[in-house]
Image (spheres, grey):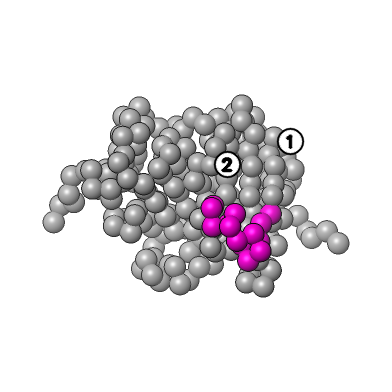
Amino acid sequence: MTAMAILTASDEAAVRKEFERFGPHPVKLTVFSQELVAGDLCRQNEQLVREVAGLCDRIAVEVLNPAIDRERAAAYGVDLVPAIAVEGARDYGIRFFGVPLGYEFTNLVDSIIVASTGEPALEEETKTALGGLARPVHIQVFSTPT
Amino acid sequence: MRLAQHMAVAAKGVRADCIEAGEFPELAQRYRVMAVPKVVINDRVEFEGALPEREFLQAVLRAVGDGPEPAA
């Protein structure tokens, strides 16, 4: 049985347009799902990721269950579901917790593109300052889909 | 928020979590999320709303103790 598509035809067209900026590195989206914890949301999240990946042959998808693939989920620093890790040439530490719809969806697509290019759209001054950080930085951005 | 993810790509030690507040009420409560977007950096510095790049960077630097102290 195929669930109804999340992305509309116009969403797909917009994402394909964005993917014209896809960079030299393939992108891997690791989806974290756990049926017993949040079945509906995890299924929706996984479906969304597969629909996005279906629009670009340079995006690979892997699904992990943190209850089973414990060590790998821990290595990704993921202890909540649903979640997505966006990786390009390396694991940049980009994570989405919850189904990224609405505004967050735009962010997911943008994250895929920046992971594929490895070139952040930041001022030189910002990049220099970040390069000199002595300690790890954990940025949490709370958002809503609307 | 776009800036956080781009910062994560820019520097190895930066991790950017984008959290759907409605799906994780316990987390939203722990960080007292009343309005979105709300940004929390290293559990030390937090702000609501979108900041321009330069101010966002200052918040990051404050969070790791490398920047100017926030005005009292």
- Residue receiving disc 1: A57
Q: Is residue A140 visible?
A: yes
Residue B15 in percent (x, y) is at 44, 47
Instruction: Report the residue at 37% width, 55% height from top.
Output: B39
- Residue receiving disc 2: A87
Which chain is indicated by disc 2?
A
Label ID, residue A25: none
Q: Is residue A10 left or right of residue A66?
A: right
Question: Dot 2 surroundings within 10 Å: few (below 14), some, or many (20 or more)?
Answer: many
Question: Dot 1 surroundings within 10 Å: few (below 14), some, or many (20 or more)?
Answer: few
Magenta segment: A63-76
Foreground residue, A72 or B31?
A72
Q: Is residue A33 left or right of residue B4?
A: right
Which image quadrant for residue A82?
A: bottom right
Q: Is residue A126 visible?
A: no
Mark 1 or mark 2: name the one nearer the start of the chain: 1
The nearer-to-camera label among 1 and 2 is 2
Dot 1 lies on which element? loop
